Amino acid sequence: MAPFIPQGLVSPELNFFFALVLGIAFGYVLEQAGFSSSRKLAGVFFGYDFVVLKVFFTAAITAMTGLLFMSYLGWIDMSLVFINPTFLWSAVVGGVIMGFGFIMGGFCPGTSITGAVIGKIDAMVFVAGLFLGVFIFGHFYNAFEPLYTGSFLGNIFVYDVFGMSATGFGLLLAIVALIAFTVTQMIEDKINRIPALQIKQRPSFRFPAFLLLASLFLLFVLPSQKPGHAGETSPKIMMEELNNGVAFADSQKVLFHVLNQTSDMILIDTRSQQEYGRFSLPMAVHIPAGDILNTGWHSFFKTDPREKVFFSNGSTAATQAWTLARRAGHDHVYILEGGLNALFDMIFVQEIPEPDDLQKMEERFHARFIKKAREYFQEGMAGGSEKTVTNTPVLPAYDRPAPVAGGC
Amino acid sequence: MEKKQLSGIVLLLVVLFTAATGINKIASAPYKLNNVQIAGKTANQELFLSYEALHAHIKNNSLEQFILADIRTADAFASGHLEQAVNIPMQDLPSKQARRILNKKKPILLYAEEEHQAAAAQLILFGMGYEKVQYIPGGFQDISAFVLKDYRPSRAYYRSDKARFDFPRFIRGYETQKEAGPRQPFQIPAASPPATAAGGGC
C-alpha cells in the first residue's frame, strides 16, 4: 500500500488490515502453486523443477513493468515507495545462509509457514528452526551487529551503478528473464526426459514475450522526462482564476483571520528570510517562493484543509508562489490581494470616520473593524510581544513519508 | 493456463497501457517544462527589465528586439499602451492565436495592469516552453507615469513588490522585540534519516 499511506489515503492502522488480507492471499497463492512442497523448491537446485524461479522472476518483471509504466504516467511517485536499503555484506552472508537452508529444508520462510499450516511435519520443523535462528540472532546480536549494519550503501540501484536508465535496465532484466526461462525449461526437459513430441505440443509463449519486450522497448525509447502530467492545472484555468479574482483573498478577510485567529486559514509569508525575520503577520509561516516545490511541503499542501494564503510586500512574490503551487494541482491556495502594502494602507493610511457618525450599517461595521485592527496592531498584539513570536504555528512536522516496508 | 488466455491478458494490458498513455496525454496540461525546470530557469535569468533599461531602450528605439506584449484587456489597451506593443489579453495567452504571435526564439517582454499578473504570466509562459520572457515591473499606470512621462533615476529600480511602509513601526513594542533579536524563522523540518536496519526478506 506504499503510495497510499504517505499520501494519507490509508491510515497506518488500516494498513494492518490490508497487510492481513494480502498476507492471507499470498499464502493461499503460494500453497495453490504447490510451493508448500519442499520438493518443488529443492527442484531448482537439482534441475528437475524450475517453477519457483519462474514464478518469482515473473512476479519481479510484472511488478517492475507496472511500476515503470505508472511512474512514467505520473501515477506513482517512486520516491515514496519503500526500497530495502543495501547492507552489502549482511546481504551476501544472509543470501548464502538462506541458500543452504533452501537446499537442506526445501523451504523458504514464507513457504515453510504455508507448509506448516497444511500440516506438513518437515515444514513445522523448519519453522521451529527459523525461530531458533531468530532467537540466536537476537541473543548474540552484539556479535552480529558490525556485520548486520556494516557496509551500508543506502538505497542504491543497479542501473545507477552501471550508469544506465531505469527503463534500459528494465528491458535488459526482461531479456535476461526470458533467456533464463528458456534455458531452465530445456534443463528441466532434459532431466525429466520429456519426449520431444510432448514438448512440441506445449503452448508457445513467444507472443506474450514479444509484447513484454515491445512495451518495455517503447518505454525505453520514449523521452524520459514528462513535463506535464494529469492532475496539473492548465495555463488557461490559472489565467482565468487570476483574471476573475478567484485566486485572491482580500485584505479584509485576511485581517479578520488575524484579529480573530480563525482556524480555517493559514498565512504563508513568501518574502525573504531577512524580511520575515524583521516582521511578519502573526501566525504566518515562512515559505520563500523558491521553496514551494520542496517535496517537504508537498504533503502539507495536499492534505492540509485550511485556506493557504500567500503574501508578500506587494503581490508579485506571492503570485509567483501561487502560480507554482496552483500548477502543481494544489487547491485552496490564494494570494493576499495587494499584499502587506494594501493591508497596512487599509489599516493605517486610509481615513476612517468615527463609527457612530456613520448612517449605513455596513460602513459603521467596517469602520469599527478597521479601528479594532488599528488598536490590535498599535497595542503591540500583532508583533512585539513574545507571545506572538512563539505563536508561529508549528506545522505537523514533516516526515519524509516513511515508505512502508514490505517483503515477500 | 492456455496460451490464448495468457496472450489475451498480456494484449489487454498493453491496450490498457496505451489507452492510459493516451488519456494521460489528453488530460495533461500543455506544458513543455515542469515546475522544477521553471524554478531553475527563474534562478538563472533576469526576470524583469528595470525602468532604467526600459528607458534606455525607448530612447535608443531598440525595443524592437522584443515581442512587447500588453496582457491587459482590449479596452485598457485601446485607451493607451506602449508603442510597438501587441495586445494579448492574459486569458488568451495559452490560445493558438497567441502562440502564432509569440515567437519562441525572440525574447518576450510583458506588462500588465498590475505587476503580479505579468509575473504569473511569465512563469506560465516559461512552462509552455518560451525561452526568454521578462516583464516590466509595476502596472501600466506606473510605467506610463514613471518612465514615459517623467523618468527619474531614483525610480530606475521601481517594483511594486517592494515594501511601501516600514511595517514594524506601526506596531508598539517593536523596539523591545528588536532588542530580543529577530523572530525565529520557521524552518522546514529536516527529512527523517534513512532507515539504518534492513527489513523484509523472503
Image (cartoon, coloured by chain):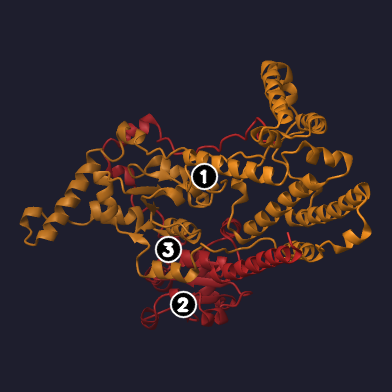
Q: Mark 3 points at which residue?
A: B116
* Mark 3 neighbour density, 10 Å: few (under 14) some (14–19) many (20 or more): many
* Mark 2 neighbour density, 10 Å: few (under 14) some (14–19) many (20 or more): some
* Mark 1 neighbour density, 10 Å: few (under 14) some (14–19) many (20 or more): some
Provide residue A307's location: percent of width, then percent of height.
Answer: 36, 52
Residue visible at 71% across and 50% down in the picture: A59
Mark toward the viewer: 2 or 1: 1
Please state the chain letter of the residue tagged with numbered disc 3 in the rendered image.
B
Secondary structure at numbered mark 2: helix
Which one is earlier in the sequence, the residue at label 2 or at label 3?
A: 2
Quadrant, the C terminus of chain A: top right
Mark toward the viewer: 2 or 3: 2
Q: Mark 1 points at which residue?
A: A5
Please state the chain letter of the residue tagged with numbered disc 2 in the rendered image.
B
Amino acid of disc 1: Ile
Judged left or right of residue A372, residue A318 is right
Q: Do marks 2 and 1 share a chain?
A: no
* Quadrant of the rendered image containing residue A376: top left
Question: Which chain corresponds to the colour red?
Answer: B
Judged left or right of residue A366, residue A193 is right
- Residue A401 can be seen, yes or no: no
Secondary structure at numbered mark 3: helix
Question: Which chain corresponds to the colour orange?
Answer: A
Amino acid of disc 2: Asp
Secondary structure at numbered mark 1: loop
Provide residue A178's location: percent of width, then percent of height.
Answer: 82, 56
Q: Name the residue under label 2.
A: B92
